[in-house]
C-alpha cells in the first residue's frame, strides 16, 4: 500500500458549511469552530437574532459567515434555504442537522401535540434538510458532500420521561444509516453524533421550565449521570463534528459517535 504522509489535520479550508440551530449551544460551537478552521458557515436558525449575534462575532474575528432564517420543520423554507446556498455560495460541502427541541414526559404524559411537535422538528427537520442537502450535493457531483446529524444517547437507551425525545432521536439515527447506505457510492457521507448531557441553554431552559426553585439540585443530578461526573461542554461535541466534516474522515459513513462521559457504557 502507498505510504501516506500525515499533515496538519481537520482544516475545512474553502468548504461551505450549513449549520442548523447555529444560534445557540452545540450548533453555535460548531459554527464557530468550523469558521475558525477555514469554512464559510451559513448559520441557520429559527431565531434569526441569535444566529446574527454568532455570525457577527465570527466575522469580527476574521471568519466567514452568513445568516439564514429557517424553521427546519417547514418544507418550503428548507427548499428556499438550500436554493439560496446554491445561488450565493454555489456549493454545499457540509450539512449539520443540529436544530432540536425537547419535551419531558412519559408515554402517559405526552399528548399527540407534544409527539407531533418533537417529531416535526427533530425528525422531520432532519429528513427535510437532508433531502434538500443531498439533492444539492448530487447536483454538484463529483464533489459530493457530508452530512452530520445531531442525535443523542436518547437514540440508544431509554431515558426516564423522555418518550417523544427518545423516539425522535431514534429516528435521526435510523435516517443517518439509511442516507449513508443509499448515497455511499455517490460521494456523500452521513454520520451521527450522540451526545450525553451537554451544558447548553437547552439544558438550562429545561431546568427553568421543569424544576423552578430547585435547579441546582437537578443540575447536580445531570452532572452525576455521566460516570465522568460532569456534563459535557458544547465544544467537546463540536470537535467530533469537525472530524466528521473533514477530509480525514473520508472512510467514515453510517457511524454514530457517542460522546457521553461514559453514560451508555454503564
Ligand atoms: N444539550 C444536550 O444535553 C444535548 C444532548 C444530546 C443531544 N442534543 C441535541 O443537540 C442539538 C442542539 O442542542 P443544544 O443543547 O445546543 O440546544 P439549544 O437549545 O442551546 O440550541 C438549539 C438551537 O436550535 C434552534 N432551533 C430550535 N428549533 C428550530 C427549528 N425548528 N428550526 C431551526 N432552528 C431551531 C434554536 O433556536 C436554538 O438556537 C439538539 O438537536 C439536541 O437535541 C443536546
Image (tube, rainbow, N blue to C red):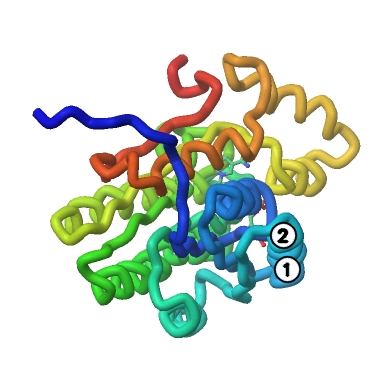
Q: Nearer the viewer, residue 140 or 109?
A: 140
What residue do we see at 43% from left, 65% from top?
124
Q: Which residue is mark 2?
A: 54
Write down the quadrant of residue 142 in the picture.
bottom left
Kind of element beneath mark 1: helix
Residue 264 position in % (x across, y down): 45, 23
Q: Residues within 10 Å of mark 1 (few under 14, many from 20)?
A: many
Q: Which residue is mark 1?
A: 52
**How many badges with numbers are in the image?**
2
Left/right of residue 179 with respect to residue 77 in the rendered view:
left
Q: Considering only vertical position in the picture, is 81 above or below 4?
A: below
Residue 72 position in % (x across, y down): 52, 69
Residue 174 position in % (x across, y down): 31, 49
What residue do we see at 44% from left, 31% from top?
258
Mark sitting on residue 26:
none
Q: Considering only vertical position in the picture, is 46 above or below 54?
A: below
Left/right of residue 212 with respect to residue 194 in the rendered view:
right
Left/right of residue 101 with respect to residue 194 in the rendered view:
right
Residues tagged 2 and 1 counted as in contact (Cβ below 8 A): yes
Left/right of residue 174 with respect to residue 187 in the rendered view:
right
Q: Considering only vertical position in the picture, is 11 above or below 133?
A: above
What residue do we see at 80% from left, 39% from top?
211
What distance separates the C-alpha of mark 2 from that of mark 1?
5 Å
Residue 110, visible in the rendered structure: no
Q: Residue furthest left?
A: 1
Residue 176, visible in the rendered structure: yes
What residue do we see at 66% from left, 34% from top?
233
Write down the quadrant of residue 254 in the picture.
top left
Amino acid at each position: 500500500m502507498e505510504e501516506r504522509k500525515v499533515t496538519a489535520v481537520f482544516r475545512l479550508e474553502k468548504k461551505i458549511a450549513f449549520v442548523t440551530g447555529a444560534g445557540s449551544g452545540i450548533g453555535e460551537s460548531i459554527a464557530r469552530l468550523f469558521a475558525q478552521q477555514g469554512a464559510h458557515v451559513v448559520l441557520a436558525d429559527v431565531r434569526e437574532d441569535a444566529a446574527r449575534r454568532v455570525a457577527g462575532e465570527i466575522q469580527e474575528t476574521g471568519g466567514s459567515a452568513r445568516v439564514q432564517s429557517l424553521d427546519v420543520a417547514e418544507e418550503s423554507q428548507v427548499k428556499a434555504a438550500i436554493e439560496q446556498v446554491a445561488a450565493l455560495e454555489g456549493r454545499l460541502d457540509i450539512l449539520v442537522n443540529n436544530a432540536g427541541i425537547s419535551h419531558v414526559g412519559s408515554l402517559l404524559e405526552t399528548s399527540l401535540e407534544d409527539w407531533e411537535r418533537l417529531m416535526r422538528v427533530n425528525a422531520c427537520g432532519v429528513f427535510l434538510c437532508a433531502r434538500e442537502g443531498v439533492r444539492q450535493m448530487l447536483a454538484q457531483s463529483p464533489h459530493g458532500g457530508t452530512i452530520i446529524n445531531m442525535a443523542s444517547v436518547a437514540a440508544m437507551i431509554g431515558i426516564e420521561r423522555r418518550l417523544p425525545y427518545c423516539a425522535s432521536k431514534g429516528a435521526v439515527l435510523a435516517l443517518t444509516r439509511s442516507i449513508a447506505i443509499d448515497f455511499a457510492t455517490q460521494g456523500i457521507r452521513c454520520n451521527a453524533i450522540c451526545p450525553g448531557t451537554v451544558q447548553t441553554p437547552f439544558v438550562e431552559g429545561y431546568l427553568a421550565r421543569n424544576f423552578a426553585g430547585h435547579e441546582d439540585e437537578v443540575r447536580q443530578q445531570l452532572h452525576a449521570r455521566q460516570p465522568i461526573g460532569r456534563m459535557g461542554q458544547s465544544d467537546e461535541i463540536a470537535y467530533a463534528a469537525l472530524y466528521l466534516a473533514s477530509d480525514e474522515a473520508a472512510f467514515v459513513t453510517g457511524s454514530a459517535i457517542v460522546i457521553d462521559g461514559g453514560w451508555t457504557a454503564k
